[in-house]
Image (spheres, helix red, strand yellow):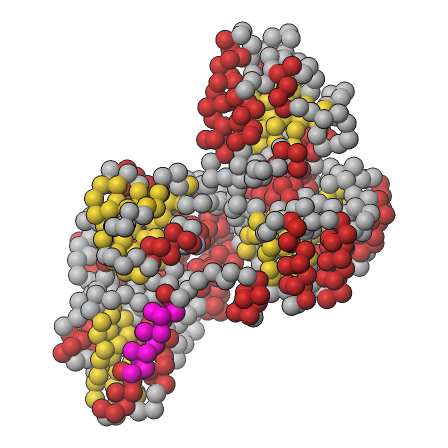
Amino acid sequence: MKVFSEIRKNAYYDSVSLMQISKKVEQLEGVEKTLVGMGTKLNKDLASNMNISNDALQNTTANDMFIVFKAVDESVAEKAYQMIDELLNNKKQFASEDYRVPTLDSALRQSTDSNLVLISVPGKYAFEEAKKALEAEKHVMIFSDNVSVEQELELKKLAVEKGLLMMGPDCGTAIINHKPLGFANDVSAGTIGIVGASGTGTQEISVLIDRLGEGVSQVIGTGGRDLKAEIGGLMMLQGFKALIEDEATKIIVLISKKPDEKVVEEILELSCTTEKEVITNFIGCNKELIESYGVYYAETLEETALKAVMLTRKEYGEITEVDLFKELKPHNLEIEALITSELEGFSSHQKNLLGLFTGGTLAGETVLIMNRSLKSIHTNMSKGPKIDINTLTELDHDICLDLGEDEFTVGRAHPMIDPSLRTEIIKNGIGNNVAVLLLDVVLGYGSHPDPVGEMYDALVKAKTDAKSRGDYLSIICSICVTDKDPQD
Amino acid sequence: MKIMSNDLNEYLDGYEGLCRIHSVFDHSINLQTEECLFAVFCDIKNVAPMSVVLDELDFRCLKNLDTEEIQLSKHLLIFPNGNIIDLNNSVIWNTTLRSSFNDFKEKDLKRTKKVIKEMILKEGDFQGLGYLVHTIDELYDPEYQPCPEMTNDYVDFIKPKIIEFIEVLSTGSFETINQRASEMIGLGPGLTPSSDDLLSGFMIYLIYMGQSMDLSKEIIKQLTDSIVKNLGEQTNEISKSYMIHASEGKLNKRVKSLMISILSQSKGLKQNVEEVIRFGGTSGTDLMVGIYLGMNMILDEKFKGRLTG
């Protein structure tokens, strides 16, 4: 046996490739031992120790890559050299040809082991692409909007038939096997599974779960219309079934904007087939109906997350039934003190509230909560007179706007990506009667890199303008983020 | 969306001049200025100290560049053909942990240690220094059962050196620690030698667990400084810069998530350990062994005593 070596001066190859090359060389008949690495002193000492060193190796530096091996003769060594060269060059060739596939067809051809297709194309093309993907036995997430109800139903029926997920259309968020898709936050892995028919609501719950120290197993989006009578909750049912079967999921959270009652009952019936704890946040749904199926009812996103976390801890034996939900009691002394101090600054004519939201569910929940104490809050989320944002300063009532509604996104990106419309509204003046400005900031993958920075100057100006009039503007902002999100 | 680590952002604020393409991999490119090396990635998951993540198109432009030198000015990468990659307005990613995690109990630490050991044994890559888990157990676990077959050439070679290193950590001078660490640096397969990854994991754990347990920051700093002092020619430029980042408590995204789950006792621990282990060839496993060493040492009264000052 003789020692042979291949040295590449000042060359860097990633560890995985080097290890693979080393293994392949070692498998050659007539090769006994290989060592691969950078020419550090210690690696060279080790090679000497193993009796596979030579002068060439001893002359390397820490920035040179080496492969050294023992072979029976020159011809075997030649084969090994050829193989090393081929593998290193193939790698280079592969690297330079690394490219993004231009069509779904080529992606399906090239990536046969992938099992989910994320579709984000103009709505009119989404149906065909999604159908193609489902027919190729892939799960689908349609981020695009403007897909008709009829097309949605056809796609979802096909998915159910094939036992696949068809998330969307207009599915803003999902976390599948811990991979965030669309708008999603960097949430810790855990045992709570979520099926959501509302994007930011689902995001907010996952973020709160993370903040409370637990994590999610899967987050499945369904698209906002899924629980309407026309669609019949096909994907909520499909996602729910998947979580029932998923071993990593111990607690299940279901969330939707106002659903159809019959659809809700069908979903609740499915809950009877599992021993896993289920919590629902179905806006506007009858509490007694939900609880009659042994399912937990939660009215707000925060309550939903808290209940899911408490039930997880009960599952782990960390808390008992008696202590379950104890922490849900209000502990708002700090908030009350803040309210008292904020109230001091208002003038008597300041009696209105203005909500400018980028997240639809956050806006919806705000209206739901505010309706308990305010008589009529004007919103673009329900039928009623259209609100003209150019005349906001002249309006004299409480307003809450979802800036992600179609009327505001024609010709511009969703406000979570491009929040400039909100900045413009604030900059142009929000009216002297506004006492409280409610905002949201949704961070995470897919969202604007710095939504606060984007509106900061406008907020300062709004505050200063109020002060110069002898008024006071109170700004309250909800932030949806985890400490691991990219905006850090 | 471009994402830049805060340390690179600070560095580029004051930098104007040439930078050289140091090395190119499938998913990363290293650029070198006169003072340092920084990385360019195209996947946000890879964001790390002294790095920037570009979108795929910009990344490919840089990768396919037919030159070795690029002008760097005011956060702009200017190619010889006039094309520009604008790094201004990048989202800034913090490489250190800002949250404090206090109220750490010994039983929590033991439970986490157990999970990490199980994960290394179950998911680890043992072509580097993974089997040192057994050496560590041999030193710290009274119920340790010998596993003579669980070894390889690297482990056999470094075992006496790491035992000496562990000994001096508790009682030796910082100079001796430096000597012993020097005898370990640069061993193992792959781009970043395994022993470097192990020491990085050890330093990172020590820094953050030290903060959580209110141990002396000064002593820990002296200790990590003495590990990376005079790295010289012992290892390559890339590994050297990773080790220096680790000694300053700077983390890449995967390790940051892992440290958050270790320190906050959250349920995502296994997932995050798995993410780290999967990274690189043996690097992730070797780094986890370093963390595992730190966990054992911090429970050792003699070592802990030194860190309480």
Q: How many marks?
A: 0
Q: Residue at x 58, y 32 (%)?
A: A440
User: Between B44 and B152, which is closer to the camera in this rendering?
Assistant: B44
Left or right, B294 with respect to A338, comes to left
Report the predominant secondary structure element of the magenta stretch.
Answer: helix
User: Between A447 and A296, which is closer to the camera in this rendering?
Assistant: A447
**Quadrant of the rendering where the C terminus of chain B is positioned:** top left
Give the answer, above or below, for where B127 lies relative to A338.
below
**Quadrant of the rendering where the N terminus of chain B is positioned:** top left
Give the answer, above or below, for where B260 lies relative to B154.
above
The span picked out in magenta is A82-95
Q: Residue at x 43, y 73 (%)?
A: B145
Q: Residue at x 30, y 91 (%)?
A: A30
Residue A330 horizontal/vertical position (percent): 66, 30
In reply to whether residue A420 is colored magenta, the answer given is no
Residue A21 horizontal/vertical position (percent): 34, 77
Q: Is residue B78 visible?
A: yes
Q: Is residue B227 visible?
A: no
Give the answer, above or below, for where B238 lies relative to A9.
above
